Amino acid sequence: MDKRGMKWAGVAVAIIIGTTAWAGNKRAAPVTVTNASDGTGHAQGSLAGARNSADATQHIGCHLISYAASTGGPVRVLCVANSAAGVYGTCSSTDPVIVEGVRSIGDESYLWFNWDASGQCTYLHVSKISYYEPKLF
């Protein structure tokens, strides 16, 4: 191979290496909701995955509702989720452990929450891990 051929081969290698995506583990986390016949259920998915989805239906997250100290009301959590198929789930809680978990939710967190037949949150899992997609817009 002459010098000119070697030059173009080097350019081709540089282009291939320059366009190769070097990235870590990635996972899609669309919203799923399961409602059992006994009134219990669970929901899971990432906030960014729901936000980035092509449909206008998916959402997941938790509201933290605080009352003025003068009213004496407790801090309350309301977690909600809706899948692309339109399956909806919700739960609420005043449990300090669930409230603390909700305080840790970020824009790109992955959530999993369970509820009992009375609609009370019985479990909250919050993950902040690099393999869940970032919010695009």
Image (cartoon, rainbow, N blue to C red):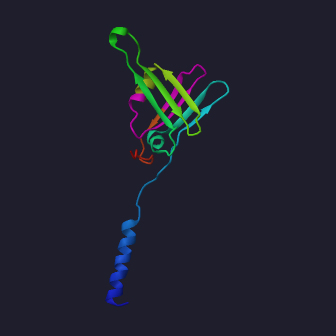
| Residue 37 located within the stretch drawn in magenta | no
What residue range appears in magenta?
Answer: 102-124
| Residue 119 located within the stretch drawn in magenta | yes
Residue at (36% x, 86% y) in the render: 5
The quarter of the picture where the N terminus appears is bottom left
Instruction: Point out the residue furthest to the front here.
Output: 56
Residue 33, how many percent across, how many down?
Answer: 58, 35
Instruction: Point out the residue furthest to the bottom here.
Output: 2
Residue 30, how many percent across, how many down?
Answer: 52, 42
The quarter of the picture where the C terminus appears is top left
Residue at (38% x, 75% y) in the render: 13
Residue 117, how many percent across, how many down?
Answer: 61, 21
How many numbered markers are drawn? 0
Vertical order, 93 against 61 (above or below):
above
Q: In which quarter of the image is residue 129?
A: top left
Q: In which quarter of the image is residue 63?
A: top left
Residue at (38% x, 19% y) in the render: 66
**Of 96 and 7, the residue lying toward us:** 7
Q: Is residue 53 left or right of residue 35?
A: left
Vertical order, 2 against 102 (above or below):
below
Q: Is residue 52 left or right of residue 8?
A: right
Residue at (39% x, 32% y) in the render: 104
